[in-house]
Amino acid sequence: MDNINGAVACAVIERRGRSDAAELPHEAQRIEAAELIVAYLEKIGVQYVFGVPGGAIEPIYNALARSERRGGVRAVVARHEAGAAFMADGYARETGRMGVVIATSGPGATNLITGVASAYANSVPMLVITGQPPIHAFGKNALQDSSCTGINTVGMFRHCTRYNSLVSHAEQLEIKLVGALMQATQTPRGPAHLSIPVDILRAAVKAPSAQADYTSLLRTKPSLVDLHAVQLLRTELERAARPVFLIGQGCGEAIELILKLVEATNALFITTPDGKDFINSRHRSYRGVFGFGGHESADALLRSNPDLVVALGTGFGEFNSAGWSGNLLSSRLVHVDSCEENLMRSPMARLHVRGRIRSVCAQLLEQLEPLPPSNVVELPDAGGEHGCNPHVMLHASEQYESDATPIKPQRLMHELSRRFPPSTRFLADAGNSMTWAVHYLQPRNRRTARSTDRAGAPSKDTRSGNASWLRVTMDFASMGWAIGAAVGVARGNPKCPVVCITGDGSYLMSGQEITVAQAEGLCVIFVVLNDSAYGMVMHGQRMAGAERIGWELPQVDYRLMALSMGIPGHVIDSPADLDAIDFDEILARKGPTMLDVRIDREEVPPMFQRLKTLGSVK
Ligand SMILES: Cc1ncc(C[n+]2csc(CCOP(=O)(O)OP(=O)(O)O)c2C)c(N)n1
């Protein structure tokens, strides 16, 4: 019996007590609408639903309670709905499964919006379900009416979802649910929202029949490729003296093939800030990050006029194109992507190759003439001092080794790179955290992006083919994203330690989600860059010569704050303080740990490009 039928059977069995035996054959074909939703989630491999309960979605929580009892999908309760959406985002990114978030009508739904918008901007597949009062109460000033006669949440979600619909009759539910799940996973991926009145969630609907099984549609991922364009790209690659590959966020499942292409074409490569997470930053052909928080070496490589730049899986947003730099966006560009929206952003490219990136690379590798054996070498780490890649130019590199007190953020990144095992997942929050992490984090032994378990051994879970070691939030860049997302990553993959690098401003905004990591027993290390400031705002104002306003934050002891929640922590003032911490103990802990790091806030983060785009500096 597969899961969906198992769930249906359980729902029917639970109803047996309330119904007489004569009704059973009829009952067996009908289940509660909320039960149908949970059954679908189970069928497509979802393990957790993130959210905050409330009256209008009570039937879903009831169904989740029953599901948990039989070992199926389980509810993870967040402290704020935006936090729940960030968790679903992290869960989806880590596992490759659908992120699911639920919220009640009215304020539950409006609280969700920032997290949903963030997933939309970052193309993260997400099913968003919000409640409504019963349909008969619409227009009567019902509590938390969120229909078109109240605070219209369907209207609000219109601009940050790929699918958005009010279910106004129980028989619509299945087809709209399938539509939402399909839209969420189609390119461009993103959140799909269903707004469901509570009476519809309670209504009996037809159980899904084996004849009309939509879930096979949901599981398949087509490998469509424009073969003619691939041949043109092959010719370009064969002609180029030394091509440059730009690896973007959409390259997760293709990364090993891309690195083979780099070898086969004797190329150099750079990444976007959100593509750095797939590669070993010590690879000898790597020249750094291009874009926000990036490296001069990446910029210099593009300025050196390479004859061909192949950009894969990127939408050339402000952060990952260094403010639409002409060094990148030129006629030397070939753009490879499965997402039309991304391709639309590079009209100057000499060639567009549409298709699933993995399939495009596989085709190219088949077609390209192999290099003579003497040229094909197993690429070792580039080596270099302090484990740094000598080809990747660090800004203010002397601070990477500095013993000064208060600790330099650059030195902190060095220590985090060194002290956590290769399987660690880092998340960096909006604010300076992101620039420090993108620029300076270089974890050990990340030879490829292949999934690894805690010990660094290849993981058997092929769904997480994009085993990223560093995740950031691009384009929308909401403060607090990393806090919820870290919990979601850890929930999706409890075998790997998770490090959330965040600012004190972000932590004051969303830090309550640490209690979810505690309740769920998840090993998440929260590293708060404590500078008693909205650091990015403070530095931005200084660099731009703007008024100095609104950047100061109170001095807070985040260790004590965590302690009050039963969570252990440490205060770190200097690099030496890190030596006093037993990292093995932290990593073995089934629960979160707080590292309150009092950083030197005078260190200037690598964020000049952003100010140029804003027009704050010339
Ligand atoms: C929800 C939200 N509000 C405001 C901003 C604008 N903003 C960007 S960075 C920043 C300061 C972040 O401060 P903190 O979290 O302390 O990190 P730091 O820059 O000091 O490392 C602000 C206010 C934002 N990105 N997101």
Image: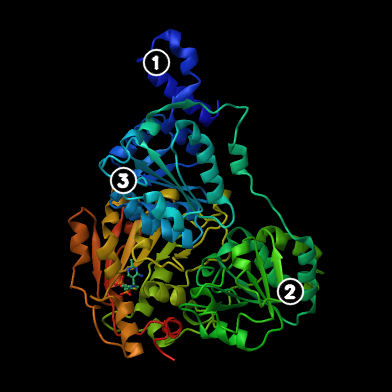
Image check: 93 left or right of 283? left
276 horizontally vs 67: left or right: right
Of the two numbered discs 2 and 3 in the rendering, the one whose residue sits closer to the viewer: 3
Instruction: Please provide percent x and percent y for residue 328.
Output: 60, 81
Pointer 1 or 2: first along the chain: 1
Q: Ligand 1 is found in which quarter of the picture?
A: bottom left
Which one is in front, 29 or 163? Answer: 163
Residue 176 image point, x, y percent: 51, 40
| x 31%, y 41%: residue | 139
Q: Amino acid at mark 2?
A: Thr
Q: Is mark 3 within 8 Å of ligand 1?
A: no
- Residue at position x 46%, y 36% in the image: 37
Coloring applied to the structure: rainbow
Using the image, determine if residue 158 lies above or below residue 50: below
List the residue tagged with mark 2: 265
Q: What secondary structure is marked by label 2?
A: loop
* Dot 1 or dot 3, earlier in sequence: 1
* Helix, strand or loop status at disc 3: loop
Q: Quadrant of the N terminus?
A: top right
Indicate whether 490 appears above or below 272.
above
Binning the other alpha carbons within 10 Å of mark 2 as few (below 14), some (14 to 19) or many (20 upward) gives many
**Which of label 1 and label 2 is nearer to you?**
1
Q: CA distance from mark 1 to mark 3?
A: 30 Å
Q: Which residue is mark 1?
A: 16
Q: What residue appears at the point 30 percent right and 78 percent down from the top-left corner? A: 535
